[in-house]
Amino acid sequence: QVQLVESGGGLVQPGESLRLSCVASRSILSFNIMGWYRQVPGKERELVALITNSDSTNYADSVKGRFTISRDNAKNTVSLQMNSLKPEDTATYYCWAKVYAPLRNYWGKGTLVTVSS
């Protein structure tokens, strides 16, 4: 059973930074892709950023230039550095991992980020 455990959420003011971390219960090299989604009540979960096991990255347009995803294979950790936070970044952030064969998606339980003055 794969576990993804997020940490680092909290309450910050607009313009401030947060760093989210996701620790996996097994080597993250076993996942083809890892990333972060976010969701606000009443809306669909949206992809924020992803990183492949070859270190290719992709970001939602709304966070490009502000968020950076990275991975530490030795620590089985994927992180999301979030700078210049805006109120519209307020959401529950979920860690995600994908394996192609066999096809599996894994999810963490989420960590809440609130950006408010």
Image (spheres, rainbow, N blue to C red):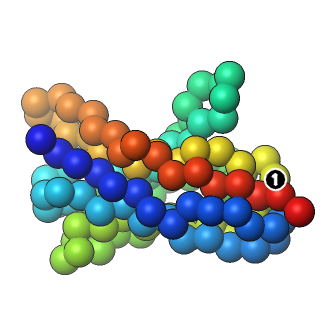
Q: Secondary structure at mark 1?
A: helix
- Rendered image quadrant of residue 74: bottom left
Residue 9 image point, x, y percent: 56, 61
Q: Relative to 88, is 61 on the left or the right?
A: left
| Outermost residue toward the right in this view | 117
Pick whichever, 108 or 85, lies toward us: 108
Residue 100 image point, x, y percent: 19, 35
Residue at the image point whose x is 78% and y is 47% from the top: 88
Q: Amino acid at mark 1?
A: Pro
The quarter of the image holding the C terminus is bottom right
**Total tally of numbered discs in the picture:** 1
- Name the residue tied to disc 1: 87
Whether residue 20 appears in this view of the structure is: yes
Residue at the image point whose x is 14% and y is 61% from the top: 27
Q: Is residue 30 above or below residue 41?
A: below
Q: Judge the density around disc 1: few (<14), some (14-19), many (≥20) Cα neighbours within 10 Å.
A: some
| Outermost residue toward the front in this view | 11
